[in-house]
Amino acid sequence: MKYLANVTTLQYSLDKCTGCGRCVEVCPQRVFEMRDKRAAITDRDRCMECGACALNCEFGAITVNAGVGCAAAIINSMVTGGPPSCDCSNTSAGCCG
């Protein structure tokens, strides 16, 4: 599943990556894969900004503003019982439509 194009806050530093593969293991959207013994981003637009990769990267190779974007909208929807909304749109459907 892809979200909005070119809006993710996901940042990855190949220089800091040690090739542990934790990001590959924890990413629910398969944003990362291993290539040449290092992590690589397969498709940045698949990132739902849940933050699992950054929280599990002990080497600081990954940063992301968790709690923004569609992951937050879906979680807020589950908590409130309303439609998904990340408060980034004035439409009734929110940004996740």
Image (tube, rainbow, N blue to C red):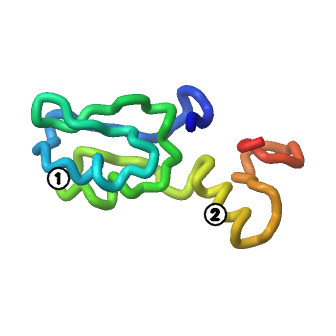
Q: Residue at x 58, y 53 (%)?
A: 71
Give x and y (percent) for residue 74. Answer: 66, 57
**Which residue type does callout 2 highlight?**
Ile
Give x and y (percent) for residue 93. Answer: 84, 46
Give the quarter of the figure containing the N terminus.
top right
Q: Is residue 29 left or right of residue 97?
A: left
Q: Give the number of callouts.
A: 2
Q: Residue at x 17, y 52 (%)?
A: 59
In the picture, the disc for residue 95 is: none
Q: Is residue 71 left or right of residue 76?
A: left
Please tell me how crowded label 2 is: few (under 14), some (14-19), or many (20+) other residues with Cα within 10 Å. some
Give x and y (percent) for residue 47. Answer: 48, 41
**Which residue type does callout 1 highlight?**
Phe
| Residue named by callout 2 | 75
- Which element is circle 1 on? loop
Q: Is residue 94 left or right of residue 37?
A: right
- Which element is circle 2 on? helix
Q: Residue at x 10, y 35 (%)?
A: 37
Q: Is residue 97 left or right of residue 45?
A: right
| Residue named by callout 1 | 59
In depth, the one of 26 and 62 nearer the eye is 26
Precedes in sequence: disc 1 or disc 2: 1
* Residue 90 in the image: above or below residue 66: above
Marks 1, 2: nearer the viewer: 2
